[in-house]
């Protein structure tokens, strides 16, 4: 846990539209040793020698293939690269050119590729901004799985300050789906008093659930729901029910009153984010243990139509705190000009889902290939960083374009 003094208060304000082992740096091939025979030319392994990590590459053909010291040109500097993950080398080169700090690929729940750039270590954490929202969605799912709440209940069951107001009918689902119809909080002042910032907002759509709008205040309101439904701090609930079971090192940024940011503010490693995506890829199960109910996961990865009528505007590219490559981003009522018909990324499979945070923090799950790909960059430190990142779209475009190209190479 860290206080708000560690980072600029505004960093968590802006979001950008868009069974795994505990460390993705481990598990080199058992035979990996300099000069020994190897079976799969092109594989990269990071092994320990004389107290330091040494990268080896399987080079040669057939019976002549041997492990030798790897060069930067081998796998773009990967510390781990096995099997079909070689299709992602070009993507790693591309994201490195755009200041990426780490990239991880999981295949069927196992780490198969990892790159660490510019001195970034396996335990180095970044401010993941609005990727925090997807962590928050998972925590709500855990609470529902444990019978502590139901997402179709009014949020005012726990946010009693909303009782008797226009927001009394706002459900937890509305908050998760960003269709609450409430005003946005003051994102500059919010880190000084997160609960106060949420409670200072009001209902500005007559019928809750009638319109989608990206909304930090709705995600932050989940902190009030969770803490009151569970009877404990979100920090302790998350540590016991999510972070510890998945072997995560993630932590929260807190406001001066000890309230964690749930719309942004988590610090996490590439591996932490990959584990969260893998949890959803596996339907909420982890090493045979049920963490989140499978029905909730499926609901989260489905477009949310929480209202209907002539003025209803829904976003089919958004589920419950997760982005979706759905076939029809405008799923109800008149189309919003910011969403065109068809998937957001036509070159990718329609089942792809992802997390996205300011300063281009990205992690995608691909159910059709059972893979997870995560890229993290230096986290936003100021509001200016976040605003500038919104105006620079190249890193987002590169991530999805190169992901599509890597998946195509695998098929080819």
Image (spheres, grey):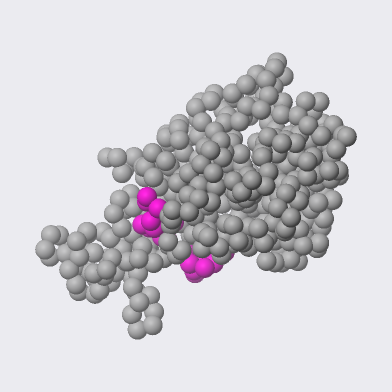
Q: Residue at x 67, y 62 (%)?
A: 236
**Residue 227 inside the magenta-drawn segment:** no
**Between 64 and 387, which is closer to the camera in this rendering?**
64
| Residue 387 in view of the camera | no
Q: Is residue 395 left or right of residue 7?
A: left
Q: Where residue 346 sits in the image (x, y, percent)?
A: 45, 31
Vertically, is 222 above or below 193? above
Q: Residue at x 53, y 25 (%)?
A: 328
In the image, farthest residue toward the front: 147
- Toward which corner of the image does residue 172 lie, by quadrant? top right
Left or right of residue 328, residue 236 in this image: right
Task: Using the image as rendered, state which of residue 260 and residue 267 is in the foreground.
Answer: 260
Residue located at (61% from left, 48% from top): 146
Q: Which residue is more in the foreground, 234 or 93?
A: 234
Q: Position of residue 247 (x, y in %)?
A: 51, 63
The reply to whether residue 255 is in sight is yes
**Residue at x 75%, y 29% (from the top left corner):** 208
Q: Left of 221 or right of it: where is 142? A: left
What span is in magenta?
A: 104-125
| Viewer-nearest residue: 62 or 253 | 253
Quadrant that contains the N terminus: bottom right
Q: Is residue 148 left or right of residue 159?
A: left
Question: Residue 127: x percent and y percent?
Answer: 62, 59
Query: What is the residue that sits farthest to the right in this orientation?
Result: 164
Residue located farthest toward the top when viewing the structure as drawn: 310
Is 111 covered by the magenta stretch?
yes
């Amino acid at each position: 846990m860290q206080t708000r003094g560690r980072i600029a208060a505004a960093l968590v304000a802006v979001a950008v539209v868009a069974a795994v082992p505990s460390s993705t740096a481990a598990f080199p091939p058992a035979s990996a040793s300099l000069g020994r025979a190897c079976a799969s030319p092109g594989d990269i392994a990071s092994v320990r020698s004389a107290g330091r990590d040494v990268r080896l590459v399987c080079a040669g053909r057939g019976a002549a293939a041997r492990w030798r010291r790897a060069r930067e040109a081998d796998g773009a500097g990967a510390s781990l690269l096995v099997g079909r993950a070689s299709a992602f080398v070009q993507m790693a080169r591309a994201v490195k050119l755009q200041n990426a700090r780490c990239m991880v690929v999981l295949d069927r729940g196992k780490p198969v590729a990892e790159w660490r750039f510019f001195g970034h270590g396996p335990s180095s954490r970044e401010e993941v901004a609005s990727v925090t929202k997807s962590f928050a969605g998972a925590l709500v799912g855990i609470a529902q799985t444990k019978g502590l709440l139901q997402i179709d209940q009014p949020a005012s069951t726990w946010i009693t300050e909303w009782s008797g107001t226009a927001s009394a009918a706002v459900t937890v689902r509305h908050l998760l789906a960003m269709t609450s119809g409430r005003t946005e909080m003051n994102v500059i002042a919010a880190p000084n008093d997160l609960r106060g910032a949420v409670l200072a907002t009001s209902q500005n759509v007559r019928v809750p659930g009638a319109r989608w709008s990206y909304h930090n205040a709705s995600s932050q309101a989940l902190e009030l729901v969770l803490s009151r439904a569970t009877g404990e701090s979100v920090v302790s609930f998350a540590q016991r029910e999510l972070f510890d079971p998945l072997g995560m090192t993630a932590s929260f940024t807190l406001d001066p009153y000890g309230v964690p940011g749930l719309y942004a503010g988590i610090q996490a490693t590439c591996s932490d984010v990959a584990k969260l995506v893998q949890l959803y890829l596996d339907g909420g199960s982890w090493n045979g243990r049920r963490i989140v109910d499978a029905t909730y996961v499926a609901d989260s990865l489905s477009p949310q139509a929480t209202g209907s009528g002539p003025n209803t505007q829904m976003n089919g590219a958004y589920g419950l705190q997760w982005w979706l490559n759905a076939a029809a981003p405008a799923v109800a009522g008149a189309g919003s000009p910011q969403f065109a018909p068809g998937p957001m990324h036509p070159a990718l499979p329609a089942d792809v889902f992802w997390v996205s945070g300011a300063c281009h923090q990205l992690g995608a799950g691909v159910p059709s290939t059972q893979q997870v790909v995560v890229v993290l960059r230096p986290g936003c430190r100021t509001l200016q960083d976040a605003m500038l990142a919104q105006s620079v779209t190249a890193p987002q475009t590169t991530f999805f374009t190169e992901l599509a190209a890597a998946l195509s190479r695998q098929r080819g």
